[in-house]
Image: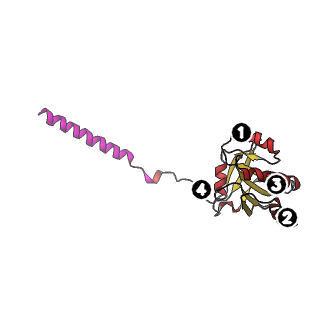
Amino acid sequence: GVTFLIKKTYYSLLAAFLFLMSACSDKDEHNTPQKAQIDPNAPKTISLLQMSGNELNITYAPGLIPKFKHLDISSHKGKILFLDFFKTDCQPCRDEIPHLVNLQDKYKDQFQVIGINVGNEAITDLRSFSDYYHLNYPLVEAGQNYIMTDLVGGVRGVPAMFMYDEDGNYFTHYLGAVPQAMIENDIKKLLGK
């Protein structure tokens, strides 16, 4: 009797519900708008915040393997670029600073050091660090700096330094502290001196 009617009603409602749900989920393939085709090799730009508050825009070609073979930093176009990945608590990184300050002074019209902090310091600590060492080159805050480590193929230890020619093409890199003369010789090679 009654139990049979309840079961019959229940199964009828369930079947109708399932039918409606399957009908609603069927998409009309012909009216679906096509997604815009995005070129995976098109240049991409990332913006990193400098300690000064200015943004440092870096354009790279993601199709290049490794990605660090060419970078375009428009605010420093025409200069040799020197990316210094460092941590404030790294003694070899701190030992390298006087060399970089000297080279930045000596070649300021042709050479640009950019310090890229991969530590977790607060901006106030980074400013104190910059003041203490009398840095004459920009530091980029830690926010998106791990994107930069990926762009140069990964940074497994610091200091890690990468040099690019005036056109943004990769020239060489250094792992660990190196003598100022070694970096300066490479600058001179790029300048044709």
In the image, what residue type sits under mark 1?
Answer: Ile
In the image, what residue type sits under mark 3?
Answer: His
Neighbours of disc 3 within 10 Å: few (<14), some (14-19), many (20+): some
Task: Answer with mark 2 or mark 1, whichever residue precedes in sequence.
Answer: 1
Task: Point out which mark residue 38 bears.
Answer: 4
Q: Which residue is mark 2?
A: 188
Compared to 46, does 179 lie above or below?
Answer: below
Task: Answer with mark 4 or mark 2, whichever residue precedes in sequence.
Answer: 4
C-alpha distance separating marks 2 and 3: 15 Å
In the image, what residue type sits under mark 2?
Answer: Lys
Nearest the viewer among 132 and 105 is 132
Q: Which residue is mark 1?
A: 123
Neighbours of disc 1 within 10 Å: few (<14), some (14-19), many (20+): some
Task: Answer with mark 3 or mark 4, whichever residue precedes in sequence.
Answer: 4
Label 3 sits on a secondary structure element that is: helix
Residue 108 position within the rendered picture, expressed as x and y whole percent measured from the top left: 86, 53
Label 1 sits on a secondary structure element that is: helix
Compared to 17, does 102 lie above or below?
Answer: below
Q: Which residue is mark 3?
A: 99
Please identify the quadrant where the C terminus is shown. bottom right
Task: Answer with mark 1 or mark 3, whichever residue precedes in sequence.
Answer: 3
Nearest the viewer among 96 and 50 is 96
**What's drawn in magenta, residue-wise?**
1-29
User: In front of the other: label 2 or label 3?
Assistant: 3
Residue 132: image quadrant is top right
User: In front of the other: label 1 or label 4?
Assistant: 1
Residue 60: image quadrant is bottom right
Label 4 sits on a secondary structure element that is: loop
